[in-house]
């Protein structure tokens, strides 16, 4: 019997749908009944995580806990958090639930270590970068995190918030090539799309080479944890 997946969503809504689609695509199923039961709580009331971490904004944890408890009550047996920055609050959230909560940065670090990566370029929100959410996970596997220069980090934030979340700026107006070149100059062997909006942007831009998508990593881990048969053995 496959386990039911619960998704603490809304951070943002498109990223939630992206995770669900990737779980479906990574499940080896020939009919509806062979897919995994997914429940998503697209809670758009969860406050911005970067604003909370860096600028004294509203605490997102209470709303995240509400979502987790709703999902548990609905029958979720595994919980997923499709927001990398939100993993800053992982311990507080995990302590409030009774079912496993998968850790996307940890799963990603494990995949990178399995490929022998020594330096990973991290594209993420300011909150993820400055709180060390990925740096700490990577360090546990002996991997160095490389981050964009301040000017390029501004462009990463522009891509996330203006390019994907608000759709107020065309994606091609953001100098993605310059961002990747900057990280390459810092020794990055691979580019980790460590914000769940970034895989959406990179897919639309057709940029794939050298990139690792943590949403896909999480989706594959979830398929396995739910007891379904995955379509691939590696998330790359």
Image (tube, rainbow, N blue to C red):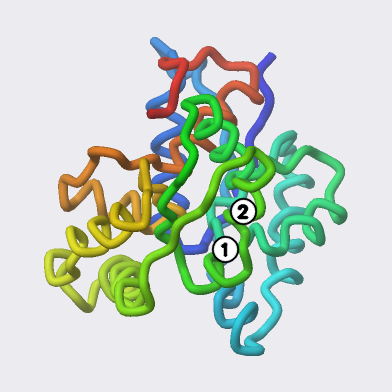
Indicate which disc, 1 or 2, sits on the residue closer to the N terminus.
Answer: 2
Contact flag, marks 1 and 2 (Cβ < 8 Å) = no
154 left or right of 43 in image: left
Q: Estimate the x, y position of residue 91 in percent, counting from the top left.
A: 80, 56
**Residue position for label 1:** 85
**Residue position for label 2:** 8
In the image, residue 102 above or below residue 168: above
Write the residue at 57% across / 63% down.
Answer: 85
Q: Estimate the x, y position of residue 15 in percent, counting from the top left.
A: 42, 54
Write the residue at 81% across / 39% down.
Answer: 99
Give the secondary structure at mark 2: strand
Q: Estimate the x, y position of residue 137 in percent, counting from the top left.
A: 64, 48
The residue positioned farthest toward the bottom in the image shown: 56
* Foreground disc of the pair 1, 2: 1
In which image quadrant can residue 103 be found?
A: top right
Q: Residues within 10 Å of mark 2 (few under 14, many from 20)?
A: many
In the image, residue 43 above or below residue 29: below
The quadrant the N terminus occupies is top right
117 left or right of 225 in image: left
Give the secondary structure at mark 1: helix
The quadrant the C terminus occupies is top left
In which image quadrant can residue 37 be found?
A: top right
Quick one: 146 or 56, which is closer to the camera? 146
Write the residue at 73% across / 54% down.
Answer: 68
């Amino acid at each position: 019997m496959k386990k039911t997946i619960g998704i603490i969503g809304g951070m943002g809504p498109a990223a939630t749908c992206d995770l669900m689609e990737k779980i479906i695509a990574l499940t080896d199923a020939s009919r509806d009944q062979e897919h995994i039961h997914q429940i998503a709580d697209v809670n758009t009331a969860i406050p911005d995580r970067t604003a909370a971490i860096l600028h004294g904004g509203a605490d997102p944890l209470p709303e995240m806990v509400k979502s987790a408890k709703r999902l548990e009550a609905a029958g979720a047996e595994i919980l997923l958090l499709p927001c990398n920055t939100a993993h800053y609050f992982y311990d507080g959230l995990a302590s409030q639930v009774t079912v496993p909560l998968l850790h996307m940065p940890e799963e990603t670090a494990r995949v990178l270590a399995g490929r022998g990566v020594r330096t990973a370029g991290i594209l993420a929100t300011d909150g993820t970068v400055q709180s060390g959410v990925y740096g700490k996970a990577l360090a546990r596997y002996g991997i160095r995190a490389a981050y964009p220069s301040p000017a390029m980090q501004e462009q990463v934030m522009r891509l996330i918030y203006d390019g994907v979340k608000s759709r107020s700026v065309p994606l091609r107006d953001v100098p993605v090539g310059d961002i990747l070149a900057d990280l390459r100059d810092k020794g990055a062997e691979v580019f980790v799309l460590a914000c769940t909006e970034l895989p959406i942007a990179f897919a639309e831009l057709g940029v794939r080479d050298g990139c690792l998508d943590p949403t896909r990593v999480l989706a594959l881990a979830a398929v396995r944890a739910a007891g379904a048969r995955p379509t691939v053995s590696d998330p790359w």
